[in-house]
């Protein structure tokens, strides 16, 4: 709910009590309740109108599939290019590259082996 926790709502309510005062608070809380009720009625009306216009297909729509958070451009392009076959999951081959070693770890490794630490005069 937009990141509003109970504590934040309570703090907003306390600030409203001090700013509006006890005389105007009931009036403004009634206005807020009417606003919330009208917004809920508008949302339900839009949903009912959409259900009427779409007909029985409204209940068959997979709304999770239309969620923008699940958007993966690689999958969409793959599915568009290969229409008949289902897309196989992409599996990366295991990497054979050595892990990156930090400069401090290299110095420690050279110090343990007794070798001279490599120095690049052009690096600085």
Image (spheres, rainbow, N blue to C red):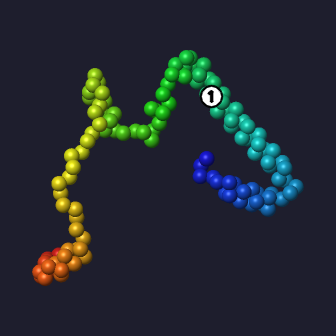
Measured from the top left, where is residue 123 in percent x and y? 17, 75
Q: Nearer the viewer, residue 102 or 18?
A: 102
Q: Quadrant of residue 80?
A: top left
Q: Extreme front residue here?
A: 112
**Left or right position of 21 against 94:** right
Residue 79 sits above or below residue 56 on the image: below
**Left or right position of 54 against 81:** right
Measured from the top left, where is residue 54 in percent x and y? 54, 19
Q: Quadrant of residue 114?
A: bottom left
Measured from the top left, where is residue 43 in percent x and y? 64, 33
Q: Nearer the viewer, residue 2 or 60?
A: 60
Residue 51 seen in the current view: yes
Report which residue position mark 1 lands on. Answer: 46
**Left or right position of 10 against 62:** right
Q: Residue at x 79, y 62 (%)?
A: 18
Q: Residue at x 60, y 19 (%)?
A: 52
How many dots with numbers? Answer: 1
Q: Residue at x 26, y 27 (%)?
A: 82
**Left or right position of 124 against 72:** left
């Amino acid at each position: 709910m937009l990141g509003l926790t109970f504590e934040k709502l309570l703090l907003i309510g306390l600030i409203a009590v001090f700013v509006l005062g006890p005389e105007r608070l009931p009036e403004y809380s009634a206005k807020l309740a009417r606003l919330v009720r009208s917004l809920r009625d508008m949302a339900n009306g839009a949903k009912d109108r959409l259900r009427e216009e779409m007909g029985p297909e409204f209940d068959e729509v997979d709304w999770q599939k239309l969620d923008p958070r699940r958007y993966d451009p690689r999958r969409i392009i793959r599915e568009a290019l290969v229409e008949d076959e289902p897309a196989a999951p992409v599996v990366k081959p295991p990497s054979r590259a050595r892990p990156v070693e930090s400069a401090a770890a290299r110095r420690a490794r050279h110090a343990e082996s007794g070798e001279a630490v490599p120095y690049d005069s052009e690096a600085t």
